[in-house]
Amino acid sequence: MAELITKIDGWVWGPVMMVLIIGVGILLSVRTGWTQRRIPIALKYAVNNEEGGEGDVSSFGALTTALAATVGTGNIVGVATAIMAGGPGALFWMELAAFFGIATKYAEGLLAVKYRQVKEDGTILGGPFYYIEKGMGPSWKWLGKLFALFGSLAGALGIGTSTQVNSIVSAVNQLFDPNNEHIAFGSYSWTTVIAAVVVTVAAILVIIGGIERIAEVASKIVPAMMVIYVVTGLLVFIWNIKAFPGAIVEIVRGAFGLDAAAGGAFGAFMLALQKGVARGIFSNEAGLGSAPIAAAAAQTKECARQGLVSSTGTFLDTIVICTMTGLCIVMTGADDWAHANDQAGVAVTIRAFGEGLPWPNFMGAVVLSACLALFAFTTILGWDYYAERCFDYLTNGNKGAIAAYRWLYIAAVAIGPFVALNTVWDFADMMNGLMAFPNLIALFALSGVVAKETKDFWRRKDAGEYDDGLAAAKAAKEARKAK
């Protein structure tokens, strides 16, 4: 089964997927007038909620829910595995995919709000399944159902559960019982068992509260954990600044296979491209179709504004956090150490943080393990919401089926630490790719709608017909300072 999953994963993330992801990102970048240049104002929108909009949570709550799902093990473990498998050059392709992914995520957020639907109980449901069905037409509903199926499977059996809890437990185990000296139930460390129980119970306590509870927890944890991780990463970067030029050269040369022998240069290039794009999408989820499910719940009147807020997720996740992780690994030589010692995953990043600062290695492990645990835990929460919304659409809102799926999701969290890590990551990558296909087709088909809405939004804003609230927020801030 592991061999079959690996083979399918290689096919899914082959040249066709690379062309689709980068191609759709380029198309949307051009048709939106290069929305990447709007990131400064998008960041302002992200922290200034819109007044009077309909939705289940605030725009900031929707963003932090999306970030809760995206800022996770992909930023710590995923970057490390990409570099170990594809070399430092994988980071280059991860960044390039993220640059175009900003436009992709913008389009996803815009379409999610434009085509969202209010259910009979007053809750809002939206995402690729609805912009496929309502935007492309009812005859394409089967494609929306296909996306919902893959999303449900990805959430419960891959990106949302096993990869996250497995990474949490591995980090905790490496911190407290690295040699597995305290064994329980045959072959598992007591640390693994206890950590699995704690994470599962904590997940239950939050998940049963629905989107409001998830958004509430995410809006508190996500900003704090991002600040802690980025500050620590910056300290590692500054302390090792002399290695920065060499790291850049290594990343660029690796990206194009220039360090490989002539016969293997193309293979090295393709491996760096594949691992960089695949792990980048795993991390920021641009094009995957997951983030628009959270965006659809935002309290907003303007679909383009929410698209801008959504686009900041890719910027923060990959351009900021993944870049920080990758540079720390390459600049400290943690990747060379890992190859020499046959290490992978979280151990690589722990090595970078431990050796990258003049403190005991244990301190680096503690900080990184804490960040990883929070990152991965919030991803479990965010992906529960995504997966449940997919299952909701798939079953036409069958409440009994949704409740059963929720407990299946929690069960997957509980058994995640006891599943082989490589197989888990390959399966998660495979399901991500299968989700992305229907969504990318829809983004390509609806790119004209995105372009039209974008042009209309900026025309109204420039003409003063739309008050985005930033001026009022600035005035209120100045008034508070005056007091």
Image (tube, rainbow, N blue to C red):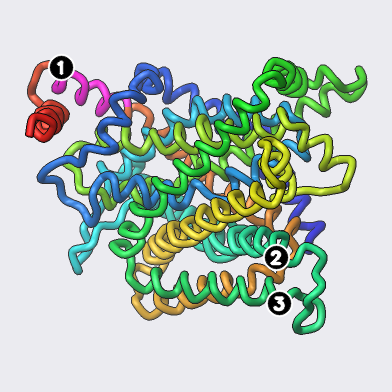
In the figure, residue 59 lies in which quadrant?
top left
Identify the element where label 2 is drawn.
helix
Does any portion of residue 443 appear in the rendered image? yes
Front in this rendered view, residue 409 or 4: 409
Question: Is residue 249 on the magenta stretch?
Answer: no
Vertical side of 170 occupied by 101: above or below = above
Q: Are the two marked residues, 3 and 1, in contact with CB atoms closer than 8 angstroms? A: no
Does any portion of residue 140 appear in the rendered image? no
Q: Amino acid at mark 1?
A: Asp
Quarter of the picture containing the N terminus is bottom right
Identify the disc placed on residue 176.
2
Residue at 58% of width from left, 43% of height from top? 75
Q: Amino acid at mark 3?
A: Trp
Q: CA distance from mark 2 to mark 1?
A: 57 Å
Residue at 21% of width from left, 21% of height from top? 458
Identify the disc placed on residue 293.
none
Question: Is residue 458 on the magenta stretch?
Answer: yes
Vertical side of 61 occupied by 206: above or below = below
In the figure, residue 196 lies in which quadrant?
bottom right
Q: Which residue is mark 1?
A: 462
At label 3, counting other C-alpha atoms closer than 10 Å, the crowd grade (few under 14, some 14-19, many 20 or more) is some
Please tell me whether mark 3 or mark 1 is closer to you in this view.
3
Identify the element where label 1 is drawn.
helix
At label 1, counting other C-alpha atoms closer than 10 Å, the crowd grade (few under 14, some 14-19, many 20 or more) is few
Q: Which residues are magenta?
A: 451-461
Q: In screen coordinates, is 1 left or right of 97?
A: right
Q: Which residue is mark 3?
A: 190
- First in residue order: circle 3 vs circle 1: 3
